[in-house]
Amino acid sequence: MRYIILAIILGGLLIVGMFGSRGHKFKETPVELFNDMDRQDRVNAQSTSDFFADGVGARKPVEGTYPIGFSIPDKPFSEGDAVVDGFSLQGTYFNSGQIGDYYGEGLPKEIKLDKEFLERGKQRYGIYCAVCHADSGDGNGVVRPFGNGGQIPIANLHEARFADPSNPDYRPDGEIFSVITNGRGLMGGYGGAIPAKDRWAIISYLRVLQKSKIDSEKSPEENPPVSTEKPQSEN
């Protein structure tokens, strides 16, 4: 029994000797069984590097290359070029949602609104938006019950400030585009994940959702049924 106790004491002393006490500072690198990549080769910002001949650590992009996901513009942004399939956040209404200092309303001229475009918006909405805002857009997505007892302030996109242009706090299409791009409040930005064209597709589908709900709430007098019967021909 005494050998077991002695072994435990020696083992404890060995562990303390190898790893030291917490909070004590050493100049030497501590012994680590699993370092989890805490220390690896890298270059700090504005630091030198012996790897490159000129000794400069921060490198300029290789001339003639473009980041993956960006289109190569035919003209400078100052001339009004639109990056239709890329992730640009600058330039025209298509890329920013703004006309001068104001948010615009309606789709950019580069967009062709058709069934295929709306289907794309529905698909992208289901991937990026429905988890919080729900398939219907009412803000009761699957994540709501898991934060703060269901009290996460997720926007109901059918509220007047989103759906009624006559409301003083109405968010026009350009502002919604900006929120998708840059985020607002608890919502993070999706500008780096959703190309500009798909952001407009999501907005177009959202407007369809809003109109569908408004039409469903109209009284029979406001929204009379439409007959599908063919008129009988006279004999």
Image: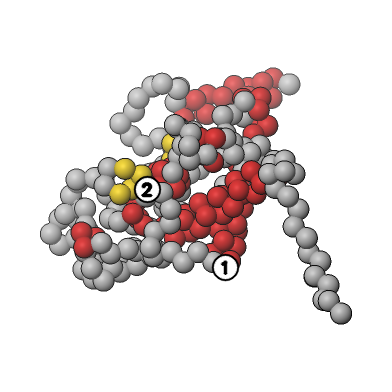
Q: Report the residue at 21% width, 53% height from top.
A: 58
Tell me if residue 73 comes above or below residue 23 in the rendering: below
Q: Is residue 47 above or below residue 112?
A: above
Give the spatial CA distance, label 2 vs label 1. 24 Å
Query: In terms of depth relative to the viewer, which is nearer, 112 or 4?
Result: 112
Residue 16 drawn at (x, y percent)? 49, 25
Tell me if residue 131 can be seen: no
Give the secondary structure at mark 1.
Answer: helix
Which of the two residues, 230 or 194, is positioned nearer the viewer here? 230
Residue type beneath disc 2: Gly
**Residue 138 shown left or right of residue 101 in the figure:** right
Few, some or many C-alpha atoms within 10 Å of disc 1 (few <14, some 14-19, many ≥20)? few
Question: Residue 35: image x %, image y %?
Answer: 46, 42
What number is the disc on residue 116?
A: 1
2 or 1: mark nearer the eye: 2
Up the image or down, 109 lies above or below 219; here it is: below
> Which residue is label 2 attached to?
104
Task: Tell me which amino acid carries mark 1.
Answer: Glu
| Residue 162 to residue 79: above or below | above
Q: Quadrant of the N terminus?
A: top right
Rendering colour mode: secondary structure
Q: Using the image, tell me which numbered label, if any, was put on residue 61.
A: none
Viewer-side residue, 43 vs 192: 192
Q: Residue at x 87, y 79 (%)?
A: 235
